[in-house]
Amino acid sequence: MALTSRGSTQGRGWLGLIAALAALVVVVLGARYAGESEPGAVDARIGAAVEGVESPWRHVARAADFLGEPAGAAVLVGATVAGCLLLRRPRAAVFAVAGVGLAVGAATLLKHLVGRTIHGDNLSYPSGHTAFATALALVLALLATGRFGRDRDRPGLGGAAGTPLVLAAALVAGAAMGWAQVALGAHYPTDVLGGWCTALAVVPATAWLVDRVADRRARH
């Protein structure tokens, strides 16, 4: 049964608009910093205030960074999938894997297309760690808000009331991971913004795609 309430439609519309704007930001920043290897003016100012933190905050930054590494990411995604399966929500499990995987994949592809580097030849735009953390937070928030909708089996784009929660989760997760990346000197601040926007653009589109494919398979 489709989510047809007015609130649900508004929630989808807002997230669709935000995804489109986020994609535009990714493209604009990518074009601006393509092929560069130095921080911009904004990067330099923010980096000077954040980079080089001392203990205990450096340990916090390293812990956050680990969660975006393959081992840490696998644990987080695996736990999310296991939770979905325990709740008998296979569609949600597929959405979790697809949403996070496509966001990180898009960030990786963009790195090679843009060619921005940091510390030598290390590709930096957009931040894959930030894209991962934001994507996972978006997935969890979309699933949580969808549980209160009329159809609990959909990965759901939530109702209008759930949209602020979804965006807040994305902001908190992206800010935390982004801070860690800048503090450790792994990325420029604009790399972090690009990673955050990459997840905002990809995950809602993935939710819609998973819904459409699953519904079509169910009908046939």
Image: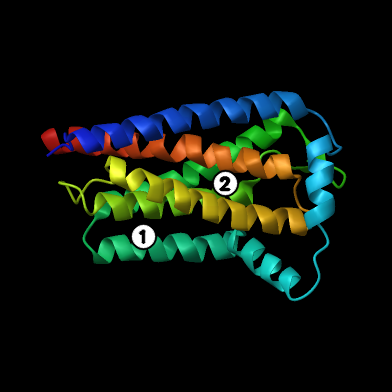
According to the picture, the residue beneath numbered tag 2 turns out to be: 131
Mark sitting earlier along the chain (1/2): 1
Position of the C terminus by quadrant: top left
Q: How many marks?
A: 2
According to the picture, the residue beneath numbered tag 1 turns out to be: 81
* Residue 102 in the image, given as x and y percentages of width and height: 48, 41
Tell me the amino acid under the disc marked 1.
Answer: Val
Examine the image and state in which quarter residue 30 appears.
top right
Measuring 83% from the left and 31% from the top, which residue is drawn there? 36
* Residue 89 in the image, given as x and y percentages of width and height: 24, 56
Secondary structure under tag 1 reads helix
* Residue 43 in the image, given as x and y percentages of width and height: 79, 41
Does the rendering let one see residue 133? no
Tell me the amino acid under the disc marked 2.
Answer: Ala
Horizontal arrangement in the rendering, residue 103 relative to residue 82 (left or right): right
Relative to residue 146, is residue 198 depicted above or below? Answer: above
The residue carrying pointer 2 sits among few (fewer than 14), some (14 to 19) or many (20 or more) residues within 10 Å by Cα, namely many
Measuring 71% from the left and 55% from the top, which residue is drawn there? 181
Secondary structure under tag 2 reads helix
